[in-house]
Image: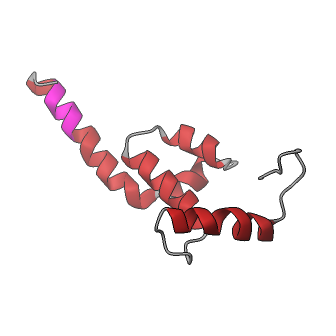
Amino acid sequence: MFTTSIGTPLQSRNLILRHLKPLLKVADIPETVRLYDLRHSTATLLLTLGVHPKVVQEMLEHADIKMTLDTYSHVLPTLTQDAAKKLADLFSGRG
């Protein structure tokens, strides 16, 4: 939930028109990008960077880790490969 400077709920239309659209313009991001797109991208980037899925779940406020893992499973194959490499490096004396 986003709030105004005095703590009252911000109307979603105001959030988009007054805040999101101007920020997208400054960042040279197409104005067709939705707030949800930014949320999804953030979660994907965090998982790709190796942030623990439980932390991502809490940041997204998903009630269940299963939802986070199911939604962002496209990122997990890379994480699995990275984990396997780290384990191989450990056993070979390189880690």
Asked if residue 83 is positioned above or below residue 76 in the image, the reply reads above
Q: Image point 73% across, 66% down: which residue?
A: 18
- Foreground residue among 40 and 68: 40
Q: Image point 63% across, 41% down: which residue?
A: 58
The mark tally for this picture is 0
Q: Image point 38% across, 40% down: which residue?
A: 50
**Rendered location of residue 8, percent (x, y):** 90, 50
**Rendered location of residue 45, percent (x, y):** 42, 51
Query: What scheme was used to colour the molecule?
Result: secondary structure
**For the C terminus, which image quadrant?**
top left
Residue 58 visible from this viewpoint: yes
Report the magenta residues as a range: 85-90
Q: Residue furthest top?
A: 93
Characterize the magenta stretch by its predominant secondary structure: helix
Q: Residue furthest bottom?
A: 32
- Foreground residue among 64 and 37: 37
Q: Image point 68% across, 47% down: which residue?
A: 61
Left or right of residue 9, residue 95 in this image: left
Left or right of residue 54, residue 95 in this image: left
Q: Is residue 57 magenta?
A: no
Write down the quadrant of residue 38 in the picture.
Answer: bottom right
**Rendered location of residue 5, percent (x, y):** 83, 46
Q: Is residue 86 magenta?
A: yes
**Rendered location of residue 19, percent (x, y):** 69, 62
Residue 35 visible from this viewpoint: no
